[in-house]
Image (tube, rainbow, N blue to C red):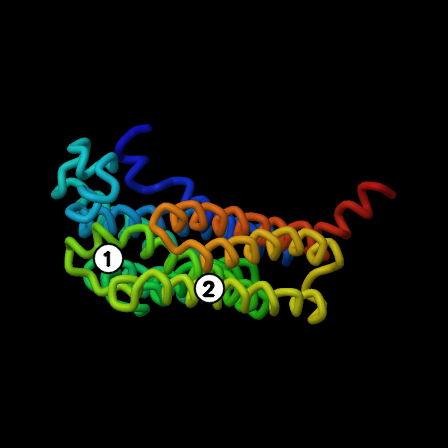
Amino acid sequence: MNAYLEILRPWNALMAVIAVILVAIISGNFTLDVLLACVVVFIVTGAGNSINDYFDHKIDAINKPERPIPSGRITLKTAGIYSISLFIIGIIIAFTINLLLGMIALLSTLLMVYYAYDLKGRCIIGNLSISFLTGLCFVFGGVAAGEIITSIYLGFYAFLMTMAREIVKDMEDVEGDKEEGATTFPIIYGNKKASILAAFFMIISSLTSPILYYLGIFNIVYLIILLIAIIVFLISVVSLLKDYSILNAKKISKQIKIGMGVVFLAFALGSPYIANFFSKLIL
């Protein structure tokens, strides 16, 4: 993969775009504003990943030496300029949609840069920051699609799931983070307590997410698909509490990502708009 594309972590950025698309699917409102919002989210998220690699190049040299900067495929200075340029482009496009989206993009950019520079290595605060930004992608889509209240609900559950994964990722990166002097939760309190905290977020999201069906936001299809995600999360909880080693943390991190993907699928297929679409198609 081209180094300039790789540093954006395109699959990660596309996951953020999916948040916007999901809100559009739920609202049934596919407009130019939504399309532009997708572009903004991809660019700004990619820029955030790039600036993160810029500040984390020493840690990545230990944890992930194959990444563009530590591998020497992109210089540190070039990565910095590249990131800033993308942030500016994303913010400008967001302001062309409307003022609120422009302000969200601007504030998100500032938080991403501060997160990469300082917050990432701080106990819990860094996890809260990235989880908040993940949930904000849904709200960004909600503003563009005119479905703000529902997008806040979805953003909340994205926040919970991301918190669990971020803590588990800190568990797997503990060696490199120690070398850099970071103060993540696993470093301060150990992987055992970190596994309990990650399990807490997975259990809370699993037990409460069916509420969205009873609120009338989604139909029965949502519950059926959601059950698969809940099983994945609960299996991950049991495994993580039994084995909180770095090796198992890497496995659980992937499982949580799969579970999040299933939840997103439940959001899409359980939406009234999709149900109405298939009903009309059948009739």
Left or right: 202, with 30 as reference point = left
Q: Is disc 1 placed on a helix, strand or loop?
A: helix
- Distance from label 2 to label 1 (Cα)? 18 Å
Q: Quadrant of the N terminus?
A: top left
Left or right of 89 on screen, residue 218: right
- Badge 1 amino acid: Ala
Q: Please tell me how crowded label 1 is: few (under 14), some (14-19), or many (20+) other residues with Cα within 10 Å.
A: many
Whole-percent x and y of residue 93? 37, 52
Q: Nearer the viewer, residue 150 or 237?
A: 237
Q: How many marks?
A: 2
> Which label is found at residue 116?
1
Q: Position of residue 213 (x, y in %)?
A: 70, 65
Q: Is residue 132 left or right of residue 144?
A: left
- Report the quarter where the C terminus lies: top right
**Front-lying residue, 273 or 169:** 169
Tell me the element at label 2: helix
For the point 24% across and 34% down, the residue is 66
- The correct choice, above or below, for 128 with respect to 141 in the image is below
Q: Which residue occupies the extreme front position in the image?
A: 242
Q: Amino acid at mark 2?
A: Phe
The x, y position of residue 15, in whole percent, is 46, 47
The residue tagged 2 is 159
Residue 36 visible in rendering:
no
Which residue is painted at 26% across and 46% down in the image? 50
